[in-house]
Image (cartoon, rainbow, N blue to C red):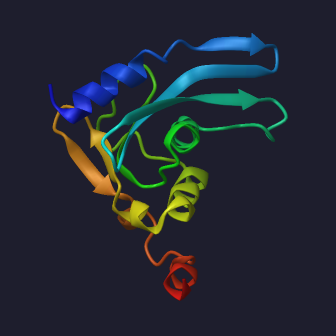
């Protein structure tokens, strides 16, 4: 079993779409990340009608990592609904891309799985070229 299969199987356990209330749904998108230390963390999407509390699976997984270990650097990420990503699928949304970049500058090198069967990936920095925050990191 390779790392992508391990991540897929862990995230898949969280996939069980449910309506928490008439206003909130959850577990319809799931994600797994591998931290710098090699640990795998999962997350699920939760969305409410008000829009304010919406959290994507990728951000929830990253927050789980931080809360449980204090780590901020991510090596790998995959996100999906009921099936693993294919044909350039599983891309994090703009808010997630921004959050991951802000969490740790090294996260620009996250391998994001876009095709599970062929193990095709893209780096976060290729999805966020000329990122505005780079200068702030370079000052520190």
Q: Position of residue 119 (x, y in %)?
A: 19, 40
| Residue for point 56% across, 78% down | 132
Query: Which of 104/92 is in front?
Result: 104
> Looking at the figure, which quarter contains the C terminus?
bottom right
Relative to 122, residue 125 above or below: below
Judged from this view, the residue extending furthest toward the right is 50
Q: Position of residue 64 (x, y in %)?
A: 55, 36
* Quadrant position of residue 133: bottom right
Query: Which of 86/80 is in front?
Result: 80
Query: Which of 8/83 is in front?
Result: 8
Query: Which of 16/2 is in front?
Result: 2
Q: Position of residue 25 (x, y in %)?
A: 69, 20
Q: Is residue 58 left or right of residue 4?
A: right
Q: Position of residue 38 (x, y in %)?
A: 30, 42
* Quadrant position of residue 73: bottom left
Q: Is residue 114 left or right of residue 132?
A: left
| Residue for point 34% across, 62% down | 109
Q: Is residue 9 left or right of residue 82?
A: left
Relative to 69, residue 16 above or below: above
> Looking at the figure, which quarter contains the N terminus?
top left
Relative to 66, residue 85 above or below: above
Relative to 112, residue 21 above or below: above
| Residue for point 49% across, 18% down | 14
Q: How many marks?
A: 0
């Amino acid at each position: 079993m390779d790392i992508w299969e391990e991540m897929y199987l862990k995230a898949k356990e969280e996939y069980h779409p449910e309506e928490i209330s008439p206003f909130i749904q959850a577990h319809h998108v799931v994600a797994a990340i591998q931290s710098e230390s090699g640990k795998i963390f999962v997350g699920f999407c939760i969305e409410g009608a008000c829009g304010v509390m919406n959290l994507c699976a990728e951000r929830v997984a990253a927050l789980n990592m931080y809360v449980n270990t204090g780590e901020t650097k991510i090596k790998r990420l995959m996100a999906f609904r009921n099936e693993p990503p294919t044909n350039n699928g599983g891309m994090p949304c703009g808010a997630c891309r921004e959050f991951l970049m802000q969490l740790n500058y090294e996260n620009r090198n996250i391998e994001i799985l876009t095709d599970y069967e062929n193990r095709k990936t893209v780096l976060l920095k290729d999805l966020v070229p000329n990122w505005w925050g780079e200068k702030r990191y370079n000052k520190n």
